[in-house]
């Protein structure tokens, strides 16, 4: 393994595409977000790589949201230094070993506002889906935008303790609109109210990552979440053979729902919030 003093860290660009793709394709499910972002091109993110001579050994994508893949943990300190020289990360999320290595490498140390560790990463393969999909779940449209903004903000407050409509309402609106336009957003509506929703955070031809799985509080415990997520997975399986998601270890109810649908543990994630 290379030592940190021997590593060269630089910003990545189009010339590094082949090496970067080969590196993150080693773990296609764990790195689905990175692989999905790479499909959008280098203009869509700020990529940093650690090289042992000419070989790319580790990578970090991010600005305020940081997603690392650091199989060579000796690369964490120089990557952390390069990253903080150009940005102040607000969240680091991804494979647990990479996340914790990067977090512990920041100098000066960055106290975590919240540490979510561990977060099981779970996968569901086409053919293993159990449960009956709801016929009422459909892709979100621009006409659903206002209702979706409200429901997603409620979930964010519940999960993160922060109201995105107070922090930056225009940015939140654009985020939800982008998901609709990508066809990455599904919902279940009843009389202009969102009963259930879910989005994708990453898409590749072989695996997607699901995020934002939410059932409105007064509809919980009625099978809405299970039927809704089953419908999202069934729709994804028309084009892609595998779904993935990660969940907080303490959210036992969600884990049981995913297990009943056929999801199985695949790896362990962690999230650090500053």
Image (cartoon, rainbow, N blue to C red):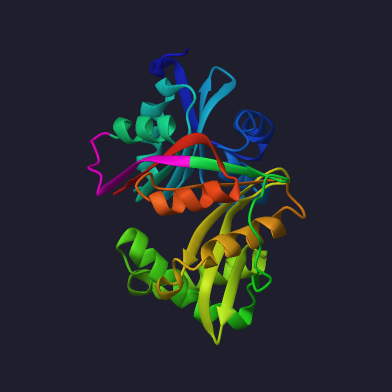
Residue at 52% in and 77% down: 194
Locate residue 122, reporting x and y percent: 53, 42
Locate residue 162, reporting x and y percent: 31, 65
Spot the residue most to the right.
Answer: 238
| Image quadrant where residue 141 sits | bottom right
Q: Is residue 198 above or below residue 241?
A: below
Locate residue 198, reporting x and y percent: 55, 63
Q: Is residue 219 above or below residue 261?
A: below
Locate residue 50, reporting x and y percent: 49, 27
- Please say whether residue 263 is visible from this viewpoint: yes
Q: Is residue 107 above or below residue 147?
A: above
User: What is the magenta range?
Assistant: 107-120
Q: Is residue 141 left or right of residue 192?
A: right
- Please say whether residue 87 is visible from this viewpoint: no
Spot the residue most to the bottom.
Answer: 191
Q: Is residue 10 left or right of residue 129?
A: left
Residue at 58% in and 60% down: 229
Q: Is residue 158 above or below residue 166?
A: above
Seen from the viewer's position, the closer of residues 221 and 64 is: 221
Residue at 40% in and 28% down: 76
Asked if the magenta segment contains residue 112, the reply would be yes
Seen from the viewer's position, the closer of residues 109 and 115 is: 115
Seen from the viewer's position, the closer of residues 184 and 34 is: 184
Asked if the magenta segment contains residue 65, the reply would be no
How many labels were placed on the picture?
0
Seen from the viewer's position, the closer of residues 22 and 256 is: 256
Residue at 39% in and 47% down: 248
């Amino acid at each position: 393994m290379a030592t940190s003093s021997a590593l060269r860290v630089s910003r990545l660009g189009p010339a590094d595409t082949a090496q970067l793709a080969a590196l993150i394709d080693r773990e296609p499910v764990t790195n689905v977000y990175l692989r999905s972002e790479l499909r959008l091109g280098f203009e869509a993110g700020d990529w940093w790589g650690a090289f042992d001579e000419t070989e790319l050994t580790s990578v970090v994508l991010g600005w305020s949201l940081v997603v690392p893949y650091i199989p060579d943990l000796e690369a964490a300190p120089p990557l952390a230094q390069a990253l903080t020289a150009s940005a102040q990360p607000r969240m680091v999320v991804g494979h647990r070993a990479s996340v914790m290595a990067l977090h512990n490498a920041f100098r000066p140390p960055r106290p975590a506002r919240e540490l979510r560790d561990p977060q099981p990463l779970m996968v569901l393969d086409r053919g293993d889906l159990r449960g009956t999909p709801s016929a009422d779940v459909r892709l979100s449209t621009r006409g659903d935008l206002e209702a979706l903004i409200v429901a997603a903000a409620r979930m964010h407050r519940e999960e993160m303790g922060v109201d995105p409509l107070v922090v930056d309402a225009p940015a939140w609106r654009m985020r939800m609109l982008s998901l609709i336009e990508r066809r990455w957003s599904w919902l279940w509506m009843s009389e202009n109210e969102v009963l259930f929703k879910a989005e994708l955070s990453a898409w590749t031809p072989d695996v997607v990552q699901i995020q934002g799985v939410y059932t409105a509080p007064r509809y919980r415990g009625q099978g809405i979440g299970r039927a809704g997520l089953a419908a999202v997975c069934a729709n994804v399986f028309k084009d892609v053979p595998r779904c993935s998601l990660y969940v907080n270890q303490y959210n036992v109810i969600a884990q049981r729902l995913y297990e009943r649908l056929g999801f199985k543990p695949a790896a362990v994630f962690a999230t650090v919030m500053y």
